[in-house]
Image (cartoon, rainbow, N blue to C red):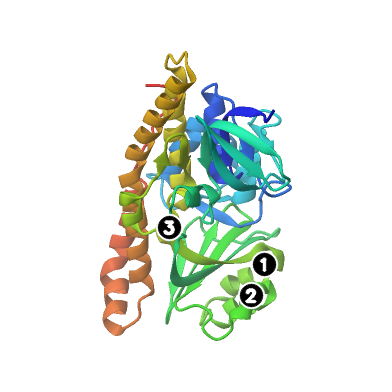
Amino acid sequence: MEPNENIVIVGGGIAGLSVALALHRLGLKSIVLESSDSLRVSGTAFVTWPNAWKALDALGVGHLLRPQYSRLFSREHEVRCLKRRFLLETLAKELPEGTIRFSSKVVSIQKSGYLKELILIDGSILKTKVLIGCDGVNSIVAKWLTFNPPSFTKRSSIRGYVDLKEGHGLNPEFLQFTGHGFRYGIVPCDDTSIYWFFMLSPFYNKDEEIKKYPKKMKQFVLSNLGQVKDNIKSIIEKTAEEDIICSPLTFRPPWELIYGNITKHNVCVAGDAFHPMTPDIGQGACSSLEDAIVLSRCLAQAFSMSAPKQEHLHENIGTCLKMYAKDRKWRCIDLISVAYVVGFVQQTEGKVWNFLRDKLLAPFLANLMLNKSDFDCGLLRIS
């Protein structure tokens, strides 16, 4: 007989582990199916805005993360740059042993009465009362919900992370530079480590092969920095090749969230499987943390209802997942749309655009990023 679970989460990234931990805090057991053989700690870092810190506090891990990373900008807003590896490891340590099942890639999803039947790559079968897709932009769960693959923006991003043992000497602030069709930024994480990114539009129009080789990526970035101070240039030069990645920038068109299925019966998506967006307002990972809190509250409410029969529990789950979709849909549509427009404005070339962006829009765009982070997902409690 195939094993049955109450809640299965596909994907062990930021969204998946956050959902699992939020459910655990509310007394609900879940398992996380991760296709890799260990935590997917590859990647660099990301900026955590005030909304992310509210979610991290609700998860009970904010106090573990704050001492490790410098506060950016001002005292009015809590903004820090977190290393992705450290966040994933922190979330994983807070989960009960055995929650994450590695080397567990889902290849097929089938209906089995009120349950969903998951067929794994090794041929094993798992049945679940709730299926949550947190498996990124190429999500098999989103595909099952009939979402299209995310759209390519014709932009890509090279990102890196470097730890300078001697210290970097930079102030705790976001440094951003623009040029002819490119934009790059330097963000200190603490006194020694730095996250940086480089975006160009259109990207790699001459040499697609460069994407496959970190050494070529580094050379490409260095050759396009323009006139910068030596300490900025040395940050790129000292970044190890294994700490440099390249990613196409994709997004889910907002109308797909309006007309698509964010949930269906006992299946839903969260994180990048739900709302992939460009990184131009820094809300991808932050909004995934919001998802975790809202979704877990809704599921906890479903399982707390009196449901003596399987079909009643199934109905409760479906109703509560619809509440989650309704709660999150317009927030995510807003973030996707604003991120896309900000990216367009920041990297569109021309004398008029350059003047508008550099002289008039820069303060507006900075305030816009802060305004979009002024969101409170609430506490982990059943209403």
Q: Quadrant of the C terminus?
A: top left
- The one nearer the camera, 107 or 287, is 107
| Tag 3: amino acid | Met
Residue 104, x across and y down, in percent:
69, 44
Tell me the amino acid under the disc marked 1: Thr
Per the model, the C-alpha gap separating discs 1 and 3 is: 26 Å
Q: Which mark is residue 239?
A: 1
| Residue 177 quadrant | bottom left
Q: Nearer the viewer, mark 2 or mark 3?
A: 3
SS type, badge 3: loop
Q: Secondary structure at mark 2?
A: helix
State the mark number for residue 218.
2
Q: Residue lying farthest front?
A: 113
| Image vertical order of residue 356 relative to residue 281, above or below | below
Depth check: 24 or 224 in front?
24
Q: Which residue is rendered at x = 71% and y = 40% of the image?
A: 124
Quarter of the figure with residue 362: bottom left
* Left or right: residue 169 compared with residue 279: right
Circle nearer the N terminus (1, 3): 1
Q: Are marks 1 and 2 in contact (CB under 8 Å)?
A: yes
Amino acid type of the residue that numbered disc 2 sits on in the rendered structure: Lys
Crowd around label 1: few <14 · some 14–19 · many ≥20 (10 Å): some
Return the x and y of residue 151 as percentages of the image width and height. Answer: 43, 64
